[in-house]
Amino acid sequence: MSSPRPARRLSTVAAGLLVLLPLAACGSSSSDGEAGRDASDPAVSVTNCGRKVALDRPAQRAVSVNQPATELLLTLGLRDRIVGAGLGDTNVLPGLKDDLKDLDLFSQEFPSFEDVLATEPDLVYATFDYTFTSEGIADRKKFADLGIAVYQSPSECAGQEATHTEALTLDDQYAEIRDVATLFGVKGRGEDLVADLEKRAATATDGLDAGGVSTAWWYSSTKTPYFAGCCGAPGIMTRAVGAQNAFDDLDQLWPEVSWESVVDRDPDVFVLADLTRGSEGDTAAAKIAFLESNPATKNLTAVRNKRYIILPGTTMDPSIRNVDGIEEVAQGIRALGLGS
């Protein structure tokens, strides 16, 4: 762990191993300006994390930081406007692999401020609040002083460690898509993407009854594990399929919990992040081995019945992948015989 980022974020992530097929943020975001602009029109703006993000014309030279931000830009057909991308993982959505080959990638997920400036960007778009700190790339003021706009996923406005009183929703995700489409002057593409995601989410959960199913979303660590709390992307997916999050009463995005508390809640299903960064308990296989050998957990309902749903770690971050996650969790619940 060479970076001081919160432990849950120190990873690259892998595609899911088991059960499911992988496919192609708490806070809201609003966009300003008239519909119908294209890349030749002037003056676009949105409100992001309580700040106005304004450009004299739609973004032409963007730096994207983190996989969710990069994948959204590529999905919107904006590859030719990305002048640099910082990724912790090049395992992008299957339909974006060819686009990724043509991108100029930084050597690390959080490049130096100087390396970002060398690309001469007009906009820096990042998923995680950590990006705009002195430990990440640089604070917002340093970009503002040079006339570079910054946009951060609204799901991270308060940062990783903040408590949350409102749960992230799919509508928040769609608002981010619309914001980004506005900043790049491609509102029509944004609306098309939102419509497609809405249709997929509805189709995936049509007729599914998972009202009595309790899920526990384990991201990382075996000593003091990180499980999903109330209000992040796992909450979106859990609510969408009609299930319950075993740690929904915890108001952090990814609180550290004790194994005693996991045993007390005895979930019906473990949803496991499959990570490749190499830390203890990161891979889904390592998580399963731990659960099935640890005296405290091997008799849990989900473990005894081998009820595991495995997702790429990035799917547990707020992004367009959350609809993939809804599809995969819905499919997994049905495959485990827990939902109609």
Image (cartoon, grey):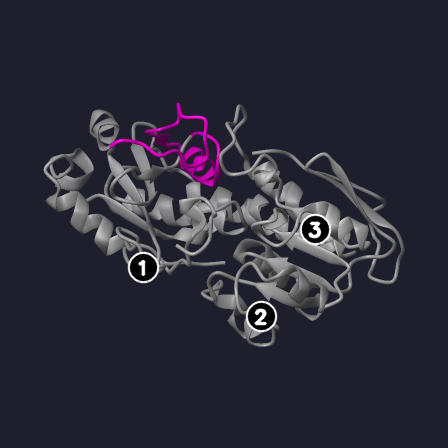
**Which element is circle 1 on?**
loop
Query: Does any portion of residue 196 appear in the rendered image?
Result: yes
Provide the major secondary structure of the magenta segment. Answer: loop
Q: Is residue 249 magenta?
A: yes
* Residue at the (35%, 34%) spot, across then down: 256
Q: Give the range drawn in magenta.
A: 230-258
Tell me the residue that label 1 is attached to.
278
Indicate the position of residue 305 as horizontal and vertical percent values: 15, 41
Q: 162 or 299, which lies in front?
A: 162
- The kind of residue on which mark 2 rests is Leu
Quadrant into which the N terminus falls: bottom left
- The kind of residue on which mark 3 rests is Val
- Which of the two discs, 1 and 2, labels the residue nearer the N terminus? 2
Vertical placement of 8 versus 253: above or below? below
**Which element is circle 3 on?**
helix
* Residue at the (26%, 38%) spot, across then down: 269
Disc ID at residue 105? 2
- The kind of residue on which mark 1 rests is Gly
Contact between labelled residues 2 and 1, with CB atoms less than 8 Å apart: no
Q: 79 or 20, which lies in front?
A: 79
Mark-to-mark CA distance, 1 and 2: 22 Å
Indicate the position of residue 266 as horizontal and vertical percent values: 22, 29
Query: Does any portion of residue 78 appear in the rendered image?
Result: no
Tell me the residue that label 3 is attached to.
180
- Which of the two discs, 3 and 1, labels the residue nearer the N terminus? 3
Q: 329 or 184, which lies in front?
A: 184
Quadrant into which the C terminus falls: top left
Indicate the position of residue 76 as horizontal and vertical percent values: 65, 60
Indicate the position of residue 257 as horizontal and vertical percent values: 31, 32
- Which of the two discs, 3 and 2, labels the residue nearer the N terminus? 2
